[in-house]
Image (cartoon, rainbow, N blue to C red):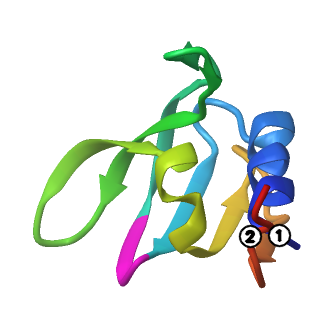
Amino acid sequence: MNCDEALKYIIDNVKIYDTLELSYNRVFTPGEVLNVDTSEYHGKPGLKVVIHVLEDTFTSSVEVDLEEVKDELIEFKHIPKNSNNETIVIIDRCEDK
């Protein structure tokens, strides 16, 4: 799917306390979703997720502006809270508008 379809999937399906593993621009960010913000920023649609990073070496929370990095988004894995179902989405292209 393209990057816009991937962001729509996140808006429609990812909820607080789900697990989301993002791969973008050589960065891997696995963790629990603390917030999904779809507010407009400077008149443009926005999509920011706050993730509590699950790592052995450190624990931290990061905010990722998915609208800002959507061209670099490679794939993500979504696991809903209290579920063994996982969805892996691979982004093959981002359409220029």
Mark 1 Cα-neighbour bin, 10 Å: few <14, some 14–19, many ≥20: some
Q: Kindly report the secondary structure that dominates the magenta region of the rendered protein.
A: strand
Quadrant location of the N terminus in the rendered image: bottom right
Expressed as whole percent of the image width and height from the top left, the position of residue 17 reads 58, 36
Q: Residue at x 26, y 41 (%)?
A: 61
Disc assigned to residue 2? 1
Expressed as whole percent of the image width and height from the top left, the position of residue 65 reads 45, 42
Question: Would you name the residue on which mark 2 appears?
Answer: 94
Check disc 2 and give the amino acid type: Cys
Mark 2 Cα-neighbour bin, 10 Å: few <14, some 14–19, many ≥20: some
Q: What residue occupies the far left of the structure in this picture?
A: 57
Residue 51 in which image quadrant: top left
Residue 22, placed above or below residue 39: below
From the viewer's side, name the closer residue of 77 and 27: 27
The segment highlighted magenta reads 25-29
Answer whether labels 1 and 2 touch (C-beta < 8 Å): yes
From the viewer's side, name the closer residue of 53 and 69: 69
Residue 88, placed above or below residue 32: below
